Amino acid sequence: MTAQEIASVLEQEFAGKITAKNLDAIDPWVAVEPAALAEVAAFCRDDQRLRFDSLQCISGVDYLEPDPKKAKKAGFDPHLEVVYHLYSFKHRHKIVLKAMLPRWKNDAPGELPELPSVAAIWPTADWHEREVYDLSGVAFMGHPNFKRILCPEDWVGHPLRKDYEFPDEYHGIRGK
Amino acid sequence: MSTITLDDPTVVEFDVRTDEMLVNMGPQHPSTHGVLRLLLRTDGEVVHEVTPHIGYLHRCAEKIGENLAPYQWIPYTDRMDYLAGMNMNLGYALAVEKLCKMEIPERAQIIRVIIAELNRVASHLVGMGAYGLDLGTFSPFLYAFREREKILDLFEETCGARLTYSYLTIGGATHDLPEGWVDRCRDFLDYFEPKIEEYHTLLTRNAIFIKRTAAIGVLPAEMAIAYGCSGPVLRGSGVYHDLRRAEPYSMYDQFKFQVACPVDADGRPQWLEAPKEAVLGDCWHRFYVRMLEVIESCRIVRQGLERYPSSQGEHRSSAWKATMKLPRGEAYVETECPRGQMGFMVIGKDDPIPLRVRARSSSFSNLSVGGELCRGCLIADVPAIIGSLDVVMGEIDR
């Protein structure tokens, strides 16, 4: 199926839960209402026409221009995207799902935005979601083993946030 | 006074009952291929659970990539899978070129294919030699490194480096191949190809090796796909999928080669030479995929050497400039690296520095299934299973 056909299947099935799409992008993508993500993901895997049996990658992207002078020209409002690259071994087609999140839940700095976990749908998401949480700061609800994976468990902050500040000190080791 | 005899099974059971024990393997254990720590929950010799702890080599390379122009980040990709630096360079270069819609000259593409396939041979030689080490045989490792040394000599001629090359870069390669390199590469292949049979004698058909790997760590195809496994780990389970064939990049569609897989494109078994103890998806199959890939890579290199002298264009696209702006948008590319499908995503912001780079590691996904594979195996099989996944920690931790 082409990206166009995949998107229209999703739009038919989940009217109102597809918030945006760009099928002319280099990798065509469809944005999904964050709360409906797990539901859409399960459909993508199980529907006979789609059969996305493989989740290739989950990436967290922080859209923020920390320099206030450049912020106006940046071309985006501050937000966080979680990007899912899906592939079907059966039909050999692919699509990109996106969930657009606020940078902080309820705009309260430090409160991580929430997204349903898809680890029960694709087991590979288990480690990938832990990595996105660890580095980009997204809370995956319903994850079976939700903790950091690459950084130590007592690390503070999420390094891939654009406004992340490297700690001055970690267990007596000077950071800066 | 009653005497206890060993004839009563309940007594024997009570006597040998062992408590659960936590065994820490690594981070400096030799069979963990770097700094991987495995926490084993064992009952006697039987492993109940394996929990990998990773992150010892974490440098947050993706964060560094957000602060450097793509050509400056190429050296950081070398340090991901440091046994296949060329393939890493190529993956990131392709992602950037996809975003910039850059055309690559034919000569550059031929160089890329030759170099990437030679690196695959070098990488699989380490994979094979180190796997022998994991299972307690030292000699294949020495032979493997003898051969690999010659490939590194060839690489040194092209770019001056023996491990972290940064040779394949945005737009092509940093230099053209030096004078006489094609002949020296052909000499190497003439020397190397007959040697492959020796490895089969040393390992593939070795009775002890088969005992240690056949029917151990069996990974069913559905589980391999669900866990995002790729490369030899996926093909060893009988999934006929190789990106060089499925979605050819860098002119791979113009090269003739077989996909190393226990089944053919129609799902029919094609490895009649497999030992009868081995089952689809076990450690032996994963190992044998790599052995066959070495032969196919040599074939591809030979075809590349044949085409190189008459190839058109330069070794690097003239469209590339150090100050080149990356347009807004995002591009994700996966390439078939020796350890599986390595993915790079680049997001541009109309500036030479990208907004975000993402590296999807194949070893990361391949290792994530390790815990499932080791459930219920013996402690001595853990190195055999983890070794058969052939992970490189530099790539997992990034």
Image: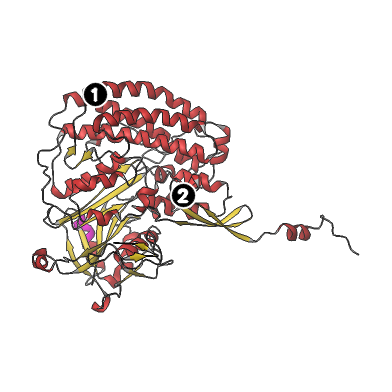
| Along the viewing direction, whichever of A9 and A113 lies nearer the viewer | A113
- Residue B310 against residue A7 in the figure, above or below: above
- Residue A1 location in percent, x, y? 24, 53
Residue B161 falls inside the magenta stretch: no
Residue denoted by label 2:
B220
Q: Can you tell which of label 2 and label 1 is closer to the viewer? A: 1
The quadrant of the picture occupied by the N terminus of chain B is bottom right
- Callout 2: SS: loop
Report the amino acid beneath label 2: Pro
Predominant SS of the magenta segment: helix
Mark 2, residues whose alpha carbon is within 10 Å: few (<14), some, or many (≥20)?
A: some
The residue shown at (43%, 47%) is B34
Q: Which residue is mark 1?
A: B306
Q: Is residue B269 left or right of residue B321?
A: right
Q: Residue at x 21, y 28 (%)?
A: B177
Rendering coords of residue B204 (x, y %): 50, 32
Would residue B367 be visible to someone looking at this image?
yes
Q: Amino acid at mark 1?
A: Glu
The reply to whether the C-beta atoms of the residues labelled 2 and 1 are less than 8 Å apart is: no
Task: Report the magenta residues as a range.
Answer: A1-7
